[in-house]
Image: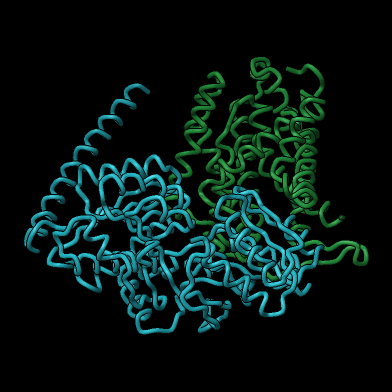
Chain colours: A cyan, B green
Amino acid sequence: MAMQASTTRRGLLAGGAAAAVAGAALGTARRSAAQRGGGEAVRIGLILPMTGPFASTGRQVEAAVRAYLGANGETFGGRRVELLVRDDTGVAPDITRRLAQELVVRERVRFLAGFGLTPLALAAAPIATEAKVPMVVMAAATSIIVQRSPYILRTSFTLPQATVPIADWAARNGIRNCATLVSDYAPGLDAERAFKERFTAAGGRVPLELRAPLRNPDFAPFLQRVHDAKPEALFIFVPSGEGAAAMKQFAERGLREAGIRLIGTGDLTDDDILNDMGEPAIGVVTSHHYSAAHDSAENRAFLAAYRRVAPDVRPNFMAVGGWDGMHLIAEGLKRAGGGASGDQLLAAMKGLSWTSPRGPITIDANTRDIVQDIYIRRVERRDGQLWNIEFDRIAQVRDPGT
Amino acid sequence: MLTVLLDGVASGMLLFVLACGLSVTLGLMNFVNLAHGAFGMAGGYVCVVLLNRYGVPFLACLVAAALFAALLGAVLERTLYRWLYGRDHLDQVLFSIGLVFMASAVVDWLMGARQQLITLPGWLQGRIEIGGGLATIGVYRLFLIALCGAIVLALHLGLVRTRFGSRLRAAVDDAVVARGLGIPVDRIFAVTFAVGSGLAGLGGALGVEVLGLDPTFPLKYLVYFLIVVAVGGANTILGPFLAALLLGVVDVAGKYYVPEVGAFVIYTAMVVLLLLRPQGLLARGGAR
């Protein structure tokens, strides 16, 4: 036993040393390549959950950032950019904070980017402030994030921003009473509040508000309760992976036959896994800022570039946040110049407007938050695949929280 | 009302199939195996891969999941677990929880961290009405009740009526004397462990549709398994079975009637039951 243990340990040490040498070699190679681009390379610290329960977010964002660089070159404002991807596992804000600190202090990154979930973005915010490094939030979606540091800019969306339009749509389309079912955690409660406020203000009624525990994907009892209460519609917000289970139960319990319509934010019909959801997802109406089926030249270019990086994956709303985040950084470098300070870069990025794969978007100069069109979409089968087909649009929605 | 009851019974049955292996290892073999859920997860992933990638029929997937988990259990029992039978419980806990983390990491690496989805065959989809509109229940949940009910019966009879069952009980009661009587204790433990793992694998496969499946499965449901074993008492088949049923019904009813505190009802039930029957539901007082 002891013998075995020591050999393994030695093996590990040797492996670690080899990896370190290889890493160093790679680093030198990269640096010399950077120097050819003229001036020191601009390093971007991309902190994402690449493993753990939120790994799909990290993979989507990273692939989109790489796709952007593949499609638009790697040199902006006269400097080559260099990506440093770090895995924060998605569940540990202290790790995110430590990684941000290391990236800023040791690697001297000029941008921090990524940030899969709200607590992770909040953990890194003080570092961005202190180091005066612009921090581009590409995924996390709670309203408050941009207020936590004057160096934060957001290219994803906010949950209330995506929720309010579906409440309006429901009220306008003859739904008078609508139950809500959300996962019992901060974003779920945000969605519940935003939906209820807007829906009741428009004259609707919320007869039943259910909260399912986060770590329990059996929605059966909750949906049975909804079934028996017979509202005209049910609004669901659950973490994106669990939407499938909820919709399956919705169909299995016969809620659709009972005449209850299923609505939600686009997390429910996440493009990444929409195809696996099958029959139960068809006809579900959601509101969101991006669908892979969005019909525009920009989106076609995005899909083509993304396919070159990740051929088997359909980009989702996380990916478009990564693509636009990289675009924002690239534009900042072009406008302020590759050698600009953090404050100059920040000033160059504030207030920018461009046509993203999702449609026209603006980074508001005051709030540094994203202003974008929100679409109402219905899941339909096209060419044997399921897609979120957009059929209505609410132009230039701001986060209602700001 | 009846619908809620039947849903609860179905989820309780499923819980039992997943947890009974743990009650066997813990109660009969006196080994704390926190990695039990990992076998359930293995079975679940076998089912998902066969069903989604190779189009194997669902029932065949269930059998394959159970066999794979049983085989995995047998191999690990022979290579790893048997060294720890004589060690104290802390060693066993540390060892098996380590195994859980390793299993989760391996699955994460192989399959990714996302929830796995399956599509049931047509004959298991849909719902039927019972008692002239008195209640409706999903066909799949009825299937769960029937299948798990059969398993419970088979296990109970197997343990009480067969020669293997009596040898197993003898081996547990006093391993030394049993060995002296020529009972192959080691082999009996190995087979028992494999059967328990196989059942967990079957439960994991059955549970994909109801409980979901991702790399955190063994940890996510560990608490439920332990509750079943703790409340049921760890040395019979019927005790954990009743406990699982009771907890399933209480859990589902709690979420239906009092969704505000739904998640805590099951823990409250556990506390109350343990206060009333600290030895477990059916335990003969003072057995340990």
- Image point (28%, 44%), residue name: A130
Residue B279, percent from left and from top: 77, 23
Point out the image quarter for the N terminus of chain A.
top left
Image quadrant assignment for residue A116 = bottom left
Numbered-mark total: 0
Indicate left or right for B69 with A220 as reference: left
When the figure is inspected, residue A116 is found, relative to residue B95, above or below; the finding is: below
Residue B154 visible in image: no
Of the pair A163 and A384, the residue shown nearer to us: A163
Indicate left or right for A15 with A136 as reference: left
When the figure is inspected, residue B5 is found, relative to residue B175, above or below; the finding is: below
Residue B203, percent from left and from top: 65, 48
Residue B85, percent from left and from top: 55, 23
- Image point (30%, 72%), residue name: A308
Image quadrant assignment for residue A72 = bottom left
Residue A104, percent from left and from top: 24, 46
Residue B199 visible in image: yes
Indicate left or right for A151 with A402 as reference: left
When the figure is inspected, residue A356 is found, relative to residue A333, above or below; the finding is: below
In the image, farthest residue toward the right: B132
Of the pair A294 and A4, the residue shown nearer to us: A294
Of the pair B31 and A259, the residue shown nearer to us: A259
